[in-house]
Image (cartoon, grey):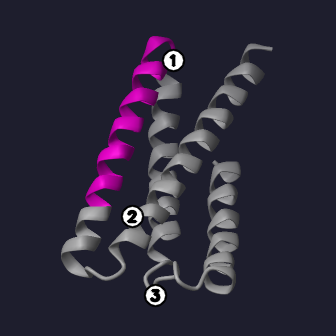
Amino acid sequence: MKSLLSIIIITGVVTGIALYGLFPDFWFPWYPLVPSFFVVLGIVMCLGMKHYNQLGGRKVIVGFMMMRGIKMASTLCFILLYYWIINKDITNMALTTCGFYLLYLVAETYLHYRSKDAQLS
């Protein structure tokens, strides 16, 4: 859990600095919402996976896939809420959120399988 959260926080800070300093056309004032959303989502997903890991067996795989579906649905809801409520720089926000989603997906999968390999060894 700490590894995943540190990846999200570090990526959020580095991306924020890069967008603000190097690509100011892509910076939007509500940018801190994106990494904050993924930090909260990461905490919820880690707690959910902790529950499924205690159940063991096939339920871990089912839980892992269910968490991915929930993550995708909540990310789409986040983008839609941003569009309906704030409706500024929606393209930049959606692209940034999709980038974070993909990075988070890769990092979560890598860390999950790494922890499963460590348990099997």
Amino acid type shown at disc 3: Pro
Where on the picture, by quarter, is residue 37? bottom left
User: Compared with residue 112, is residue 80 higher up or lower down, i.e. above or below?
Assistant: below
Where residue 71 appears, x then y in whole percent?
A: 38, 45
- Give the camera-side residue of 56 and 103: 103
Going 59% across and 49% down the picture, which residue do you hit? 103
Q: Which residue is mark 1?
A: 56
Q: Is residue 97 above or below residue 51?
A: below
Q: Are marks 2 and 3 in contact (CB under 8 Å)?
A: no
The residue labelled by disc 2 is 94
In percent of width and height, residue 31 lies at 48, 78
Tell me the CA gap for discs 2 and 1: 36 Å
Between discs 2 and 3, the one toward the N terminus = 3
Crowd around label 2: few <14 · some 14–19 · many ≥20 (10 Å): some
Depth check, mark 2 against mark 1: the one in front is 2
Is 64 inside the magenta-drawn segment?
yes
- The x, y position of residue 60, in whole percent, is 48, 22
Q: Which residue is mark 3?
A: 29
